[in-house]
Image: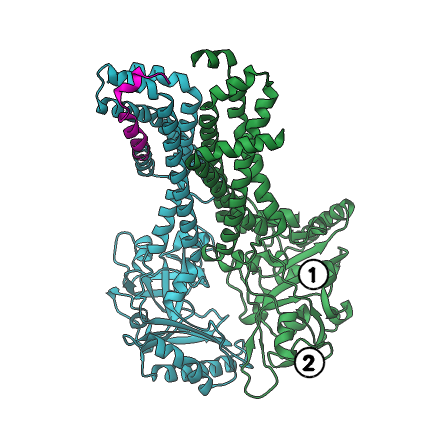
Chain colours: A green, B cyan
Amino acid sequence: MFGYYLELALRSLKRSPGLTALMVLAIGFGVAASTTTWSVFRAVSGDPIPWKSAQLFVPQIDVWGPNGRSSDGEPPVAMDYTDAVALMRDHRASRQSAMYQISPSIVPTGVGKHPLNVSGHAVYGEFFPMLDAPFKYGSGWSNNDDANRAQVVVINSKLNQKLFGGANSVGKSINIEGKDYRVAGVLDGWNPQPRFYDVVNSGGFSSATDDVFLPFQTAIQAGISNDGNTNCNAVPAESGFVGLQHSACVWIAYMAELSDAAAVTAYREYLDGYARDQQKSGRFSWAPNNRLRDLPAWLSSQHVVPSDTKVSLLVALGLLLVCLVNTVGLLLAKFLRRSGEIGVRRALGAPRSAIYAQFLTEAGIVGVAGGVLGLLLTVVGVASVGWVLPKDIADLARLDVSLLVLTLLVAVVATALAGLYPTWRASQVQPAWQLKSN
Amino acid sequence: MKLPPIIAALRRHKAGVVLIALQIALTLAIVCNAIFIIGQRIERVNRPTGLDESNLFWISQQWVGAPSADTADGVEKLDAMQREDLVALRNLPGAASVVPINSLPLRNSSWTGSVSLKPGAEAGGKGNVRTAYYFADEQVLPTLGVRLVAGRAFNAGDVQHQGFRDNPPRPVVIITQALADKLFPQASAVGEVIYSDGSSAPSTIIGVIARLQTPATGSWGSDFAWYSTLVPTRLNANFANYAVRTKPDQLETTMRAVAPLLYKVDPLRVLDDDSVRSFSEIRAKAYRADVGMAVLMGVICLILLAVTAAGIVGLTSFWVGQRHRQIGVRRALGARKVDILRYFQIENLLIAGVGVVIGVLLAVGLNLWLMTQYEMTRMPVLYVLTGVLAMLAIGQAAVFVPARRASNVPPVVATRAV
């Protein structure tokens, strides 16, 4: 029977090519707009480390007190040097790292090569295992290296390609800001988006990669100053980078790994205890007002997903809705025009279910055709996203099998839904009335 | 033409009528809000920075192995290096004027602080006005092309230099007209004294410039977008940035000459691909997201309007076909062609009228909802009114072709069996 309905449907669609084309175009455009904006939204709102994000936490300490809080009572989003180092010293989480953004220059060996500027972070050794950063060669550094302020560096594969032609460079040395550092490891093209470990400085998305990672205390000692945001509630009393370390200015990001609920509770209590100690010693004159958010909650509190992306997705879904309403109207017109034919079929003994099957097949064909057009338009859409969106976000939108399957599925399901009401109306045609009126 | 028969006829195609009205309502709601977003973005992109943007370019560079800016000795050495660069750049044949400056409007890298009428004001307290500082020398006004409206420009004697992270007093400053109006609504600001960043050292306002945008384009900086303060100071750090105004038609040749020249002065420095950029590139980059959003909204609006118009054409054509015989009867009974045409036009006007009434409610509701969720302002009534008129016009345009076909049905149809 299905083959027969297919033939009937094609014949009917051919009879009014304009109307058919209109329906297919509407579905195609509506679906393509939705899936293209979805591909961008999916890329920016995804969990950058899904297997572990529930165990990664960002602590915030209220170093400025009531005057420095945001309008909704939130403490600063970054840490000052004193608190970051104190939390590292206490070492209460299973792994943790304070970090700050750096932008040192590197002098390549070889004549005629100009120095180059790289961006990166000064971190503690636990940073790499905590974030499951993949290494191509070598590894990170140990807690001992942190304590001894070892002259080691971890570089990304991009910089390794530039400096060493992609060879295993572990043990070789790099000149950073005039000092030699031994390469401890080479990361395997690691560039998570959003850059969840330092949202405050990257704003979430960045087209630049982090090329170098230095030990935190080594970088502090070498005077490699921070390149990211510095926020102060008062002008630092002393000048220079050392003055910044002695001030209450916030410029350090922090992340801790807490494996279960008990550890989270214990860490919360530890933070409050720390703030109470500061209150007792007179450094804070206010009650503890700390925050400890897991990674998904932290990303959402920092509004990492650009609101433009959400608004475009909403508007595109609105377009799809209008296209579907349009399709309902056109299918209704198309089906009811054939009331006479339906009347004859029903009078000859076709049950309502047969009418359903026939017209849903027709709607389904429109859906498949719209879906195929939608596929083509989605390919074009994702390819031209870079033309419309900022590079660092557009680069993240990818075309993959799941997106293509989704496009086709949305088109067919949506059209079938749109076809339900017109089909129901068609099945309600009274055979006697139709035969009589003719 | 009487309305009751049209309404009576519409009751017989309830579903079709509801669908068209719904489609018009949704289209109106979405298009109004999308056009409003486009309007906001265009307004944002078109606001002048206050600079004379043509023939202006920007250099950012960094020295390698430079002395530390945290020691007095290092600051002097860094300043000497910067002055050496300036001499070389000012001798470029294409350069009209050159200024060392920490940032430019739209560069999104800013040094912000607050100024107050009282000394030692607490940061974030009342009476403080947020501002963004531009640290530059006496060449700043001609290089940026900003207009002085009162007082005097900086002279060489005003210019100091300081380490990047130091906070020495700022004896003289120039502020924008917007900041002057905010601080001194009643009187001229020239000669008045302000205190910056909670300092107790006074800064005398020696001049007021017409307009200069702050570097930040993000929403966090929109509250003080026009409150710029110029400080006559060369900042000394392991990097230095310069703005160059070239003679007419020499922008590109001068830009190309910069890297070789600076490497000749001192090869131990970082100059990469985007170290030398024209201001038009800076502008394009800063507003790329806004232009993109406007284009995207525009494309979606076009598709929406086309789909809705085509839907009206399709459904009206169907109705015309369905009522072929009735039209013939009316024509046989003496109705003129224009009566048939009017019938379908009025019918569409009725449906579209209901649609736009619902659409206005939806549009306003959507706008209010977007305001609670995202950084959106209230949509002016003008957008809704324009949208209503546009939807009605599109409805009439879409209905015209099928209505014309209906009016051409000959009266003889009435006498024929189907």
Q: Residues within 10 Å of mark 1 (few under 14, many from 20)?
A: many
Magenta-colored stretch includes residue A139: no
Chain letter of mark 1 equals A
Q: Picture coordinates of residue A354 (x, y %)? A: 60, 23
Residue picked out by circle 2: A173
Kindly tell me whether residue A367 is visible in this rendering: yes
Q: Is residue B275 above or below residue A111?
A: above
Residue picked out by circle 1: A97
Q: Is residue A256 above or below residue B98?
A: above
Chain letter of mark 2 equals A
Position of residue B153 in the picture relative to residue B318 (left or right):
left
Magenta-colored stretch includes residue B402: yes
- Frontmost residue, A438 versus A334: A438
Kindly tell me whether residue A71 is visible in this rendering: no
Q: Give the secondary structure at mark 2.
A: strand
Residue at the spot 46% in from the left edge and 41% down from the top edge = A25
Residues drawn in magenta: B394-418
Q: Give the secondary structure at mark 1.
A: strand
Residue at the spot 42% in from the left edge and 53% down from the top edge = B290
Q: Are marks 1 and 2 on the same chain?
A: yes
Give, as a three-letter code, the residue at label 1.
Ser
Quadrant that contains the C terminus of chain A: top left
Q: Is residue A256 above or below residue B24?
A: below
**Badge 1 or badge 2: first in the primary sequence:** 1
Position of residue A58 in the picture relative to residue B23 (left or right):
right
Q: Picture coordinates of residue A328 (x, y %)? A: 48, 29
Q: Quadrant of residue A358?
A: top right
Question: In front: mark 1 or mark 2?
Answer: 2
Position of residue A372 in the picture relative to residue B37 (left or right):
right
Quadrant that contains the N terminus of chain A: top right
